[in-house]
Image (tube, rainbow, N blue to C red):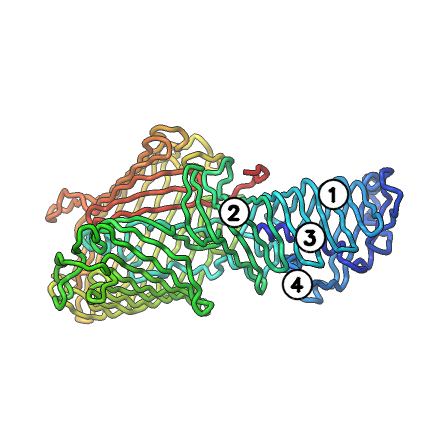
């Protein structure tokens, strides 16, 4: 990756010095008095004097002529160049142009001194090579024509678009197609990478902008309308497991002591990456045995061993992963699930495997620690019992100590396919109640995004992280098909959904809108959970969430570019008014129906900036939701809530990066048996840092805990400081 940058840099040099008469036309102005007398003739070929200034402005001419009296300046026009399979050619910015388009390419080289001794060309002192929007600077360049070897010394810097790097030394042998670069430091910007290097397609970019497709049966707008006792509500609204989305990071700083260049590949024993714009970085990705290869103008990366370093305090191994991965799971983990796994468990995630070249297979194995220690399980019903009879305590054998999740995904002509098969046990005698599966196929029909920030506006582009954008909107329309088996109170389900989402972020108003059309056939437990029934169902769900800032409590402007130790951006302190409107309608094959209208309005208060060590951040959100519900579902899994509630969301910095959080629902309907009770409670303890956050949540209702991880993206400008 860094290689790309550095490579691009070398391509102009290669063009300048590649063998035999590559320069058809060139010109040279006089050297200064320090030029050596030996062989001052232009090494690159016949000279043809041209005047760059045709303007009648005498001052411009005089200034320019003065400049060239103390600088040597060459202009090289290269015609009909031919390359071998050198990686320099692959990374050349013109690599996707046709032969006709790249017949003639122009480069300029400027330095304090230029001369040749025998068959070696030298440029010394403030060397600068330019081509279109690429520029290379160094202290000295030398090229030995006899052995076709290029060497660049001292204060090497390269800039093309927003890609840049610095290095101490570079050499390349064009006969052997190998080289190296020492002590490199640079910046990779994936938002503009393919444009800067003119690649047809960069593998890192997810250009289809496809939505999350692992479970479209349980879209958040539908789940949020369910009754508070529904197991799907408790399970699906929990935080993500411990995983990292590296593809959301659009800008990385990197460094390496040495990178080895090959014919169409590059490698390094160790490359360090960080998303943190500040030194010393809070998060570093250490990629050992890092290598890259270019195949069909696509870049493939691999790191045999990858570690995450958190504030130089501890290392977390994440296996065979690189910074291009859209989802990276820890190789080893620990969790708690009282329902399906009988308590504590250990898990191991295996790196993604390619199946038939275009299918990605992910495997996660579990060792059910508490089940093995107890010697029994409460996760299964009795064999031959009703599908929805209660689980019973039963003895186990060693195969019950293990569980397995498999996930298969691929892209098929702009369709995103995901299929999963999960085993609560590896004991075949319990497969009657131990297997579940999902199938999702989704296509994005329309996508439009626009963002305003210090960077240029980008239309129709995937934007995964908007924390750096002051104004933005996203509109997405998707078509999906799903099939689920043995999930909670659903025995089987299949159908299709058309779902639309719109989000907008303006200076004082944030809003999110969703619309879902659903048509499917379901088989599952009835509302009393004593029988299994099946029915068609079609419905429509719509929701609108808004948050309006009433009072700004920030002492700094919203575009403040400073960075806190405990937050990735300026915390928007203030008093906000939150509003919520949601409606839903389901009709069933037996002519039954249910509908709901949910209205909410309440305050949110955020105070503090997480800059000081003690109690410098507080968030309190109170949102009453008044509900009018009619009709009943024949199923237990999709019954709308019928009690008015108050949502509480609290976060409080305790000390340093340590933060405590609480979420809960208070029932306020007088006629409800749950009146005055808190439900769906969850507790959170987290570590909030500028570059990342780690949160542990626990829900006593479904006896499960979650370990969530976030890594943040920054649009930093000042990248001169090496970390």
Question: Mark 2, residues whose alpha carbon is within 10 Å: few (<14), some, or many (≥20)?
Answer: many
Q: In the image, what residue occupies the spot 40% across and 62% down?
A: 477
Marks 2 and 4 sit apart, C-alpha to C-alpha, by 29 Å
Marks 1 and 2 sit apart, C-alpha to C-alpha, by 30 Å
Left or right position of 441 against 266 = left
Marks 1 and 3 sit apart, C-alpha to C-alpha, by 15 Å
Q: Earlier in the sequence, mark 1 or mark 3?
A: 1
Residue 137 lies in quadrant = top right
Residue 519 lies in quadrant = bottom left
Q: On screen, 533 above or below 170?
A: below
Residue to which mark 3 is pinned: 172
Q: Earlier in the sequence, mark 3 or mark 4?
A: 4
Left or right position of 657 against 303 = left
State the mark number for residue 85. Answer: 4
Q: Nearer the viewer, mark 1 or mark 3?
A: 3
In this view, the residue in front, 712 or 369, is 369
In this view, the residue in front, 377 or 550, is 377
Q: Earlier in the sequence, mark 1 or mark 2?
A: 1
Q: Position of residue 83 (x, y in %)?
A: 70, 62
Q: Secondary structure at mark 1?
A: strand
Q: Position of residue 332 (x, y in %)?
A: 35, 50
Marks 3 and 4 sit apart, C-alpha to C-alpha, by 14 Å
Q: From the image, which quarter does the C terminus lie in?
A: top right
Residue to which mark 1 is pinned: 140
State the mark number for residue 251. Answer: 2
Q: On screen, 648 above or below 377?
A: above
Q: In the image, what residue occupies the spot 47% across and 62% down?
A: 208
């Amino acid at each position: 990756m860094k290689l790309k940058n550095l490579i691009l840099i070398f391509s102009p040099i290669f063009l300048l010095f590649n063998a035999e008469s590559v320069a058809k036309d060139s010109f040279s102005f006089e050297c200064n008095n320090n030029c050596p007398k030996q062989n001052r003739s232009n090494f690159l070929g016949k000279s043809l004097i041209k005047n760059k200034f045709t303007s009648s402005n005498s001052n411009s001419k005089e200034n320019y002529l003065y400049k060239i009296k103390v600088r040597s300046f060459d202009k090289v026009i290269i015609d009909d160049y031919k390359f071998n399979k050198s990686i320099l050619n692959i990374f050349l910015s013109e690599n996707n142009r046709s032969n006709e388009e790249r017949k003639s390419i122009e480069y300029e080289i400027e330095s304090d001194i230029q001369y040749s001794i025998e068959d070696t060309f030298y440029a010394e002192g403030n060397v600068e090579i330019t081509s279109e929007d690429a520029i290379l600077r160094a202290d000295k360049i030398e090229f030995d024509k006899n052995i076709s070897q290029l060497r660049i010394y001292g204060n090497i810097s390269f800039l093309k678009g927003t890609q840049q790097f610095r290095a101490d030394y570079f050499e390349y042998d064009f006969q052997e197609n190998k080289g190296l670069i020492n002590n490199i430091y640079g910046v990779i910007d994936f938002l503009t990478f393919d444009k800067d290097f003119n690649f047809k397609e960069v593998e890192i970019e997810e250009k289809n902008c496809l939505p999350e497709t692992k479970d479209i049966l349980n879209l958040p707008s539908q789940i949020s309308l369910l009754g508070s006792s529904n197991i799907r509500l408790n399970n699906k609204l929990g935080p993500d497991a411990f995983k990292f989305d590296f593809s959301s990071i659009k800008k990385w700083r990197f460094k390496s002591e040495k990178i080895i260049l090959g014919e169409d590949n590059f490698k390094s024993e160790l490359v360090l990456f960080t998303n943190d714009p500040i030194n010393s970085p809070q998060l570093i990705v250490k990629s050992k045995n890092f290598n890259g290869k270019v195949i069909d103008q696509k870049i493939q990366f691999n790191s045999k061993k990858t570690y995450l370093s958190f504030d130089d305090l501890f290392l977390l191994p994440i296996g065979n992963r690189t910074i291009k991965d859209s989802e990276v799971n820890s190789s080893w983990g620990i969790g708690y699930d009282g329902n399906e796994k009988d308590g504590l468990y250990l898990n191991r995630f295996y790196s993604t495997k390619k199946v038939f070249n275009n299918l990605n297979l992910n495997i996660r194995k579990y060792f059910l620690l508490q089940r093995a220690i107890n010697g029994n399980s409460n996760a299964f019903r009795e064999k031959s019992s009703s599908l929805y009879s209660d689980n019973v305590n039963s003895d186990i054998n060693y195969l019950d100590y293990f569980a397995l999740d498999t996930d298969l995904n691929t892209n098929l002509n702009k369709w995103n396919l995901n299929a999963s098969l999960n085993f609560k046990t590896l004991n075949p005698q319990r497969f009657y109640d131990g297997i579940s599966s999902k199938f999702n196929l989704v296509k994005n029909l329309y996508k439009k995004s626009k963002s305003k920030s210090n960077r240029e506006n980008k239309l129709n582009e995937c934007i995964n992280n908007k924390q750096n954008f002051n104004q933005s909107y996203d509109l997405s329309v998707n078509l999906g098909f799903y099939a689920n088996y043995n999930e909670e109170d659903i025995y089987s389900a299949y159908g299709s959904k058309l779902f639309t989402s719109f989000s907008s972020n303006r200076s004082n108003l944030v809003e999110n809108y969703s619309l879902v059309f659903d048509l499917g056939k379901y088989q599952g437990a009835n509302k009393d959970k004593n029988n299994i029934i099946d029915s068609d169902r079609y419905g429509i769900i719509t929701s609108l969430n808004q948050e309006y800032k009433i009072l700004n409590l920030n002492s700094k402007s919203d575009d403040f570019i400073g960075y806190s130790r405990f937050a990735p951006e300026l915390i928007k302190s203030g008093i906000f008014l939150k509003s919520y409107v949601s409606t839903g309608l389901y009709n069933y094959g037996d002519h039954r129906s249910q509908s709901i209208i949910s209205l909410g309005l309440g305050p949110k208060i955020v105070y503090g900036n997480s800059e000081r060590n003690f109690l410098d951040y507080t968030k309190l959100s109170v949102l009453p939701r008044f509900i009018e519900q009619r009709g009943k579902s024949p199923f237990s899994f999709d019954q709308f809530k019928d009690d008015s509630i108050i949502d509480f969301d609290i976060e409080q910095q305790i000390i340093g990066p340590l933060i405590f959080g609480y979420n809960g629902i208070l029932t306020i309907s007088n006629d409800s048996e749950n009146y005055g009770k808190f439900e769906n409670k969850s507790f959170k303890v987290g570590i909030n840092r500028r570059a990342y956050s780690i949160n542990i949540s626990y829900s006593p209702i479904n006896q499960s805990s979650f370990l969530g991880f976030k890594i943040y993206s920054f649009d930093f400008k000042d990248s001169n400081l090496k970390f």
